[in-house]
Amino acid sequence: MNKILCFLGAVACLGLLSGCDDDGTYVATMPEPPALARLSPGGSGTLSLALRNDGTATWKTGQVKLALTDTPEWSGTLELAKETKPGEMASFEGKATAPAQPGLHSLKWTPRHKGTAFESAVEAQVEVTCSDGIFCNGEERFANGECVAGPPPCDDGTACTTDACDEQRQACHHTPSGECAICGATCAPDCTGKQCGDDGCGGECGTCAAGQGCAQALFQCKPETQPGTCRSPLPLLADGVPALGDHTIEGDSSGGIHQVVPSCNSTSTAVETVYTFTLTERLGLEARSSGYDTVLHLRKKRTADGVADCLDDTPAKTVACSDDSSPPGNYGSRITVALDPGTYYLIVDGFDSSQSGPFTLSVRFAKDGCVPKCDGVYCGGSDGCGGNCGVCGDAQTCVKGRCLPSPCFPSCDGKECGDDGCGGQCGFCPGETLCVLATGKCDTFPDCDHLRPTCSPACGASEFCGTDCTCHKVDEPLPDLVVDEKRLRDEMLFDTIYVTDNSCAKVENCVTGTGERRVLRFSVEALNQGSATLTVPPPANRPDLFTFSPCHGHFHFSGFASYALLDLKGHTVLTGRKQAYCMEDTERVAEGPQVACSKQFTCDNQGIQRGWSDLYGNTLDCQWLDITDVAPGDYRLQVTLNPARAFQEQTLDNNTASVPVTIPPP
């Protein structure tokens, strides 16, 4: 907040300081961010701003005004509503005329006294839009130079569903009735040879008898007492084998049953394999699971009934949980924790019901509760507990914490850029060109101002220019992303992490320092409640839309979400980075024949189907705000989806969720 003071005095009032007057000094501040105003394209309307008089002069009507600066496409002046004494809040109002350019406009208003600026400009945003702000009547569009009505947002186009629109939550609900399919109108259930499990159309092929569970990968009922379950866990270590040191276990969850849900992926219905071990002294643990998209979690025997403790899905009963870590990378998981003496259950789980099969479980126990620190390092180095961070396999060598083929022969035939396969690059793209991995060539991509988009060539009579700078039909089905506010509110927790220069959190700028960092973790579930699937081109073809995560080994869609911590007046206390997401179908959240029964999109083929959601759990790297330097107190956590407006939606009005959070003392 800049303040420009104009002091009284013989020299000052000679005109060297133009904001001076014989009645004191003129200083203006904006104590609270202004609400977002709306005007129609090319239309006029009333705008207002509130400033505090922090000078010694009384502001008088007709003398103190707010004038537009550096915005030639706009016109208007805001007049002081009434005389305002020092220390009081002043209200400025006036008519403004917007350009015929939909989008988010930032207006700069300069406080002036008798025509002379006495303060730097204050900024306020105005949304130029045809929308009347009412969700349930559909989003109005600017087409052919005028505002026209859009389609109702909650009509799923299916006669056998009851569609309901919740104006307060700006959400849609669809309830199938009669013979209406709960998903996939053309889906044919397949239960051939299946005793249980998914029929491929949102239903089940059968129910297992009491004392049995469904081995989903085999579609067979298996006893709940089979080896690898909570009732009959496998020993992590053979009798007589000391815990201290490194251990590698090869397993296979294909025949496992689903009984527990990991706290760090509460939507998982995957089968699991359960191991148990007992410690007689305090030890540090690092455990890694790999082989498919695993989830790794640890529970403790807290009562005489260890089976019940193992089966207890209460998040507070989980000692540690991980869904994706580096190492091991490739959708593997890693937990690190100091453990007191006792009996524990180490559970190899999966991201969803499709994830099972052979896996490798690597476990390291370190003495005196020392927790190995190998985040971002796959091999070599020191784990801080007397060991290293891993040993490369045959015909491999450790280079900068990564295992690479040895000998390695760089492959750059015909490539201008991209990975040479040996940890190096085939070249770097000049200027604003980017490397297209699919071709190994440098290329340029269209520059789109998503906040104030323009389309070339101009759109047709029944089309509007979307935030993606593409022409869309006024009645075109579109995706619509909303935040699951309940999950955001219910899945917050405070944690302390240890960050090194090699940590993914540091490499990807998710923390503001190294060493111990205090973070506010939270889960974000993005629901696509729209009438169309959200699709994006492959990252290998459009590098301008994606960010490659060297830690996770796959591409994330850039700026999919933004996180912020606000004080109770709405000021931004802490801004997280714009979070890149690997967009994929996590779970089906809607019903109706227009909703697909099975997931389609993964990190390798990104998108979110209509009626499906993408969940980012609170144990993932960077799924937090670094609150190390934030004072304890009451705040609001704010999450916004599609903040850069990179893709066109039914509406942008429901993309933000805000929930209260109290930060306790450290």
Image (cartoon, helix red, strand yellow):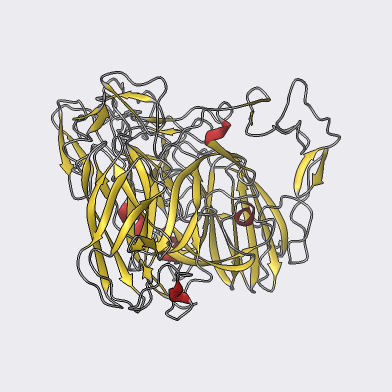
Point out residue 356 in the picture as x, y percentages from the top left corner: 52, 39
Give above or below for 409 relative to 654: above
Q: In the image, is residue 460 above or below residue 634?
A: above
> What is the quadrant of residue 149 in the picture?
top left
- Residue 95 lies, with reference to residue 174, above or below; the image says below
From the viewer's perspective, is 151 left or right of 74?
left
Q: Is residue 63 visible?
A: yes
Which residue is at the front of the view, 587 or 34? 34
Q: Position of residue 496 (x, y in %)?
A: 55, 68
Q: Name the residue located 28 percent from the left edge and 27 percent from the top edge.
A: 477
Counting from the top left corner in percent of width and height, residue 480 is at 31, 37
Task: Let me know if residue 256 appears in the view.
Answer: no
Left-right relation of 99 to 181: right
In this picture, is 259 found above or below 181?
below
Quadrant in which the N terminus is drawn? bottom left
Which residue appears farthest toward the front when viewing the image? 14
